[in-house]
Image (tube, rainbow, N blue to C red):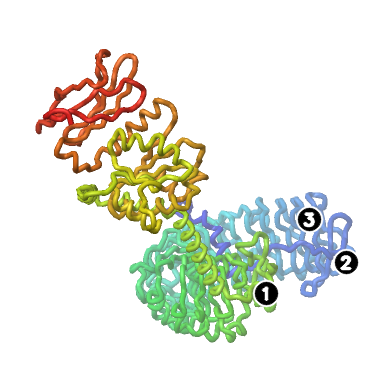
Amino acid sequence: MAPHSVLALAGAGTVLLFVVCRLQCLGFMPHEEDNVAAPAPASANVCFPDSCRCWNDRRLEWSADCSQNNGSLTFVPILSEPNITFLNFSYNKVQVITDDFFANVTDLQYLELSNNNIINISFQAFKNLTKLEYLYLNFNYNLTFDILRPVFLIPTLIRLDVRHSSLTPPPDGYFKNYFSPSLETLFLHENEIGDIDLAVFNSFTSLRKLGLATNYISKVTTSSPTHLEILEIQTNGILRFPETCINGSNESLFPNLTELWLIENVMRWLPDKVCLPKLWQLQMNGNFFKHFVKDMLHPFTNLTSVYLNAMNTKPWGIDEFAFRSPILTNLSLAFNHLDFSRNTIHSGAFAGIPHLSFLSLYQNYFHYVDDNRFSELFSNLTNLNYINLGYCSVASISNKTFRGMTSLTTIVLSGNTLRFIPEGTFDDLPNLTSIDLSSNQLSLITEYTFSAALRGRLSNVSFAWNLFECTCDLLWFHQWLLSSKNIFRNGNYYQCYNVANTTVTEFYVDQQACLLSRDTLTIITVVSSMLIFTITLAVTLFRYRWHFRLLLYEAFRAGSNRRRRRLRRNFQYDVFVSYAEGDLSWVLTHLIPGLEDRMGLRVCLHQRDFIPGHNIVDNIADSVEGSQKMMMVFSQHFARSQWCQFELALCLSHVMDHDDDLLVVRLSDESTSRDMTAAMMAVLKTTTYIQWEDNVEARNSFWGRLTIALQDLNRPEYEARGHAIDVAVQATKAKIKVMAMSSKGSNFREFILLSLDSTAGDCFQQPVSPSADQTTYYYWLADKGDGLTTVDMKSANGVR
């Protein structure tokens, strides 16, 4: 496969280069040696006007920063400070390095020439720099191996960086003529070298570290053994692990290699045979492993550190004994999103690693992993010192979670969804000194979360970015923070979730207000709330007691059978009328004549019918019990009368006990709902009442409705002669309305008589639409006047 085709396949991997940086920042893989020159400190002195500043560094002696002059400096000037050993001359748009370019700084050991535009370097440019050991030429995009010939002839050079340039494969035999005998580190990252035989670098007899990252390499080969110790070939398009054995034998092509960086390539597996006797660190982040198979590290006999982070294809499983090794100490599987609750990850995935001390599972998935599953996976790692479960969706932990992992010194649980840390969760870990619980949902840390012995051992703790509720319960944690600031990390991010713009160390609450415990306050709050609710309910029930009683009565009344049975009894009165003294005139003038004279009913009035000498309460009770119907005359006077209210209460109880109806007449006074008692309002809201008004139309309507309401009264003495009929007549200019009831008293009808010549007393005996049972309807033409007349109807045998 052509190199560029391979790189096209690896394109998905290159976009994740940022992951490598993140892994380095989080400590999941080692850093490359920093090669970026630091700017001059604020205390530096100006050692050349407007261009250079110098300062003394005990390690580097005198340093000078002449960077970022954008072309105003074409050579290194005479500096006021002698014996400059470090010079930063980057970002100066230098194109040509002349023979005398460094004539004024001959003691240089470190030289930074990055980010210029160098296109030519004089052959004698470095001849006076007899102490130069470190040279950085990064981001000079026009450099070629031909331009760099003077560089490779510097005899004292230890490290050379030529990153981000335009280097192509070196000419044949180039390094046989141009090589620095002291060169130990050569970084050629971000060029266009392509596939290259690593044997060409064997001319550098001291070379130990070679970097060829991002160079369109698809295959790593060497025609002869190299003496390299560290090989960095990350972010290329390498499909297969480099060939490491000479012609299939056990002899190594890389006998001294200790670190191999193959990050961000397109490899899918590790070979069955490897000849790397000294390799102790293997960097395989960002490749395409889908499955970590059994004994995948077996060919690596000296391997102690493996980094398998951020695979570009999401791995789905880990076999039993996948990483088995008697000497492996460091293993990182971060950013793989493995679901450790699934059976595709064997419970013995980490078995056979007795000396593992570092395990990173950052950004995997543990949401459904319980204590038993966790124990199956990790309890055998008795020598584990460091475990990272950050951002693993861990929702809960207990004092069983880390049981048996007694060698742990560091636990990272940041970025999970923990809301609570049970007491004693970490107390059985005698070597624990560092805990990271940042970015969870913790609201409370108490003195029981960590034992006193554990708190005494802790040297590095983080609870930053949690949801602390700054209340009395957090006072102990507040005091611990203040008294042990040196052990807490990111202290400015311990924010009060319930108090805006306040940190846990800043919040204040009066300790007097915290004398009661939270449980006590909860009990008091609950009891007080229940008491208030009970009182409110009792007052409401008392105020609206009749409303509820009437509603319940209407909901559960048993029907009319019980009432019909009661009506068959013999009663002393037809109607008991309850009224106030202030309404006596209306009762005697209007109500009594209509009920007794016209309707022929027996009415009980307390002023007339109560037995003298009897107790008033007994008179009321006996009269109510002895009446078929109870009628209440509501008015302002009724509402103010205590005896009327007693009669109302007694009547309400009576009608509910006997499944009866209460008849309510409301007078047309100025009374409003505010004038009514609770019982009266309850009746008015649950019972259809009859309103009395003084105008003619309203009076006719009143008597008509009242007649209907009283139609079912049982009059035994009339049954032998036939049923009584109440007729209400209303005269108009064009017609006369006659209201009539059937002989069985069950149907009440209204008929229109068009004969204007009819006179009062005329009798109409013919039936109208008789029913199947031959029920006969009787109707009588009453008085044409404006009043109401009650008459006896003609029976079948004549007039009663």
Spatial separation of the CA atoms under disc 1 and disc 3: 79 Å
Spatial separation of the CA atoms under disc 3 and disc 2: 23 Å
Q: Is residue 474 left or right of residue 66?
A: left
Q: Which mark is residue 81?
A: 2
Label 1: element kind: helix
Residue at the spot of label 3: 98
Question: Which quarter of the picture shows residue 496?
Answer: bottom right
1 vs 2, front mark: 1
Q: Is residue 433 left or right of residue 656?
A: right
Q: Amino acid at mark 3?
A: Thr
Question: Which quarter of the picture shows residue 778?
Answer: top left
Q: Report the residue that reaches farthest toward the front.
A: 613
At which x and y percent is residue 28? 54, 69
Q: Amino acid at mark 1?
A: Gln
Look at the image and tell me whether residue 174 can be seen.
Answer: yes
User: Sequence-wise, which precedes: disc 1 or disc 3?
Assistant: 3
